[in-house]
């Protein structure tokens, strides 16, 4: 069976404004005890007027010897991971600028939907300092995807692809000295707790490579709290 058809089983169903993917498995779990709170950064002029501004800076690594797991990689040293935390807190009714430094390679998405920037201000992001709206589906390393509903809240969906590090720039040990850096800005609504995950199939053990790190909290998924 075609890989992309198989991938549809492991990614998302899109309908009625709700995006439901592998993020469903993280709804009740909180295995990462760390919390990264956005840093206040004054105000910013936006399409919704001048809003409070805050920033978050995170990275994604090809193994878990970074992030919140300790230098030995914790329980799953071979798992790819985001860090330094997978639980984030940002202010409500604010503009948030996230910077993601990617040290990992990649291949092809199961679902090309996630190759495009979605939910940011003007539908774009900055990749290594240049504006972009999408990445080739066969050159994506990871995605940062915030899933769109919290109890009693309006829809909130942000998804940004991270360009893979070129294969020739991936060392056999340690981390590349040529990571890709993606920066994007979006606006939060009212308070609510959301889930986020990576929609690139970077796990193993199940159909469409959505097992292992993909199905274990604290690696490629977590909680995204909008606090009033």
Image (cartoon, rainbow, N blue to C red):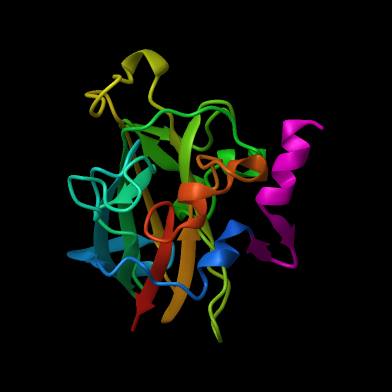
Left or right? Give the position of 10 relative to 106: right
Give the residues in magenta.
1-20
**Which residue occupies the foreground of this view, 29 or 20?**
29
**Which residue occupies the foreground of this view, 219 or 59?**
219
Q: Quadrant of residue 125?
A: top left
Left or right? Give the position of 13 relative to 69: right
**Which residue occupies the foreground of this view, 166 or 80?**
80
Residue at figure coordinates x 39%, y 72% from the top left: 30
- Farthest residue toward the bottom? 152
**Where does the image place residue 116, in percent across and percent down from the top left?**
57, 41
**Where does the image place residue 114, in percent across and percent down from the top left?**
59, 44
Identify whether 156 is placed above or below 2.
below
Magenta includes 17? Answer: yes
**Which residue occupies the foreground of this view, 206 or 132?**
206
Residue at figure coordinates x 33%, y 61% from the top left: 96
**Where does the image place residue 52, in percent across and percent down from the top left?**
27, 70
Magenta includes 188? Answer: no
Q: Quadrant of the C terminus?
A: bottom left
Q: Quadrant of residue 91?
A: bottom left
- Farthest residue toward the front? 75
**Where does the image place residue 134, in percent across and percent down from the top left?**
53, 35
Residue at figure coordinates x 65%, y 62% from the top left: 20
Q: Quadrant of the N terminus?
A: top right
- Farthest residue toward the top? 168
Residue at figure coordinates x 48%, y 29% from the top left: 106
Left or right? Give the position of 175 relative to 14: left
């Amino acid at each position: 069976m075609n890989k992309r058809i198989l991938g549809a089983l492991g990614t998302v169903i899109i309908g009625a404004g709700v995006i439901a993917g592998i993020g469903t498995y993280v709804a009740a779990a909180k295995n990462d005890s760390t919390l990264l709170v956005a840093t206040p950064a004054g105000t910013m002029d936006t399409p919704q007027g001048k809003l409070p501004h805050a920033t978050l800076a995170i990275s994604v690594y090809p193994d878990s010897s970074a992030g919140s797991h300790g230098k030995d990689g914790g329980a799953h040293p071979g798992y790819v991971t985001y860090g330094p935390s997978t639980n984030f807190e940002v202010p409500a009714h604010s503009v948030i600028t996230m910077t993601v430094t990617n040290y990992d390679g990649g291949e092809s998405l199961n679902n090309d939907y996630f190759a495009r920037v979605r939910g940011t201000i003007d539908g774009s992001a900055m990749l290594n300092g240049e504006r972009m709206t999408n990445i080739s589906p066969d050159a994506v390393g990871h995605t940062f995807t915030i899933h769109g509903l919290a109890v009693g809240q309006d829809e909130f969906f942000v998804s940004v692809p991270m360009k893979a590090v070129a294969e020739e720039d991936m060392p056999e040990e340690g981390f590349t000295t040529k990571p890709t850096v993606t920066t994007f800005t979006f606006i939060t609504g009212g308070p609510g707790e959301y889930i986020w995950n990576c929609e690139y199939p970077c796990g193993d053990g199940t159909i469409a490579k959505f097992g292992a790190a993909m199905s274990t909290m604290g690696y490629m998924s977590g909680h995204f709290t909008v606090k009033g």
